[in-house]
């Protein structure tokens, strides 16, 4: 069962949906955010109505070559910062983690991370809703259905859920959409927070995991390139024991 927002006085928004009254919005946001964090601690749909990374950063950091910085960031990465998948550059893209400052009523970029195609598809809430809707009404072709089911397995694996808990993705989407509705009503403006260069500093744990994966990838490639396709055996040096 999908987590429900806390009971609160509601009002009607422009498109006919009901939403918490102004004084109840902070508690509703806190409850929904906690529910989404529980459902998707590592990989969750983006519940903020924000532009694409390149567009958002260009608006906030004028006079800087944001596009080149993003390309360099992807080029220097060995793989996905979220699921640690080793992938080629054409399978990677940038994703922004946002910091919501309730006191100043603004949204600021906190970190720019590199993610794989599957993680990016889960982060894209509108497209994910469309995928799940098509799957539910059986309009998907066999290939599309397989792709959506792969996304479901990816979501469960990255977030540490059992493969049998297939309902958790739909629950996370429902909670994320509720948050999206509230954030749209609040209309929080984007604001530059930390300096642009600091957005591209990766956490040590993620960086270490990807570096190890990249090294393993190079070792395997070198091994496969050996003569005759044989395995490259490491050479060891034997030290002679001194006589006493």
Image: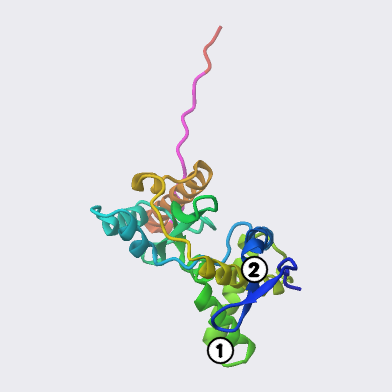
Question: Was residue 236 drawn as part of the magenta stretch in this picture?
Answer: yes
Q: What residue would you read off at disc 2? A: 21
Is 72 on the left-hand or right-hand side of 164?
A: left
171 and 222: which is toward the camera? 171
Residue placed at 44% from the left, 47% from the top?
A: 215
In the image, which is nearer the foreground, mark 2 or mark 1?
2
Could you say which disc has been placed on residue 142 in the image?
1
Residue placed at 61% from the left, 80% from the top?
A: 17
Which corner quadrant holds the N terminus?
bottom right
Secondary structure found at label 1: helix
Q: Is residue 192 above or below residue 55?
A: above
- Residue 46: in sight, yes or no? no
Q: Quadrant of residue 57?
A: bottom left
Residue placed at 58% from the left, 61% from the top?
A: 43
Is 63 on the left-hand or right-hand side of 28?
A: left
Pinpoint residue 192: horizontal percent, then vertical percent. 38, 51
Residue placed at 56% from the left, 89% from the top?
A: 142
Main SS of residues in magenta: loop
Pinpoint residue 194: horizontal percent, then vertical percent. 40, 45
220 and 100: which is toward the camera? 100
Is 70 on the left-hand or right-hand side of 170?
A: left
Question: Was residue 169 drawn as part of the magenta stretch in this picture?
Answer: no
Chain part drawn in magenta: 230-240
Which badge, 2 or 1, is on the more N-terminal residue?
A: 2
Which corner quadrant holds the C terminus?
top right
Near mark 1 (Cα within 10 A), the count class, few <14, some 14-19 or many ≥20, is few
Near mark 2 (Cα within 10 A), the count class, few <14, some 14-19 or many ≥20, is some
């Amino acid at each position: 069962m999908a987590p429900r927002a806390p009971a609160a006085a509601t009002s009607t928004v422009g498109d006919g949906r009901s939403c918490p009254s102004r004084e109840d919005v902070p508690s509703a946001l806190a409850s929904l955010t906690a529910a989404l964090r529980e459902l998707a601690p590592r990989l969750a749909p983006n519940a903020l109505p924000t532009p694409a990374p390149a567009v958002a950063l260009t608006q906030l950091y004028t006079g800087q070559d944001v596009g080149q910085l993003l390309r360099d960031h992807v080029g220097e990465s060995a793989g996905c910062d979220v699921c640690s998948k080793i992938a080629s550059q054409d399978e990677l893209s940038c994703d922004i983690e946002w910091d919501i400052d309730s006191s100043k009523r603004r949204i600021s970029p906190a970190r720019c991370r590199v993610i794989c195609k599957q993680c990016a598809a889960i982060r894209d809430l509108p497209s994910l809703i469309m995928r799940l809707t098509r799957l539910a009404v059986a309009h998907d072709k066999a290939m599309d259905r397989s792709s959506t089911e792969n996304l479901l397995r990816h979501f469960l694996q990255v977030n540490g859920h059992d493969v049998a808990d297939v309902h958790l993705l739909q629950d996370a989407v429902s909670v994320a959409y509720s948050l999206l509705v509230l954030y749209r009503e609040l209309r929080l403006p984007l604001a530059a927070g930390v300096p642009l260069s600091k957005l591209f500093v990766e956490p040590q744990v993620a960086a270490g995991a990807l570096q190890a994966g990249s090294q393993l990838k190079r070792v395997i490639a070198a091994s496969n390139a050996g003569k005759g396709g044989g395995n490259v055996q490491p050479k060891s040096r034997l030290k002679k024991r001194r006589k006493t």
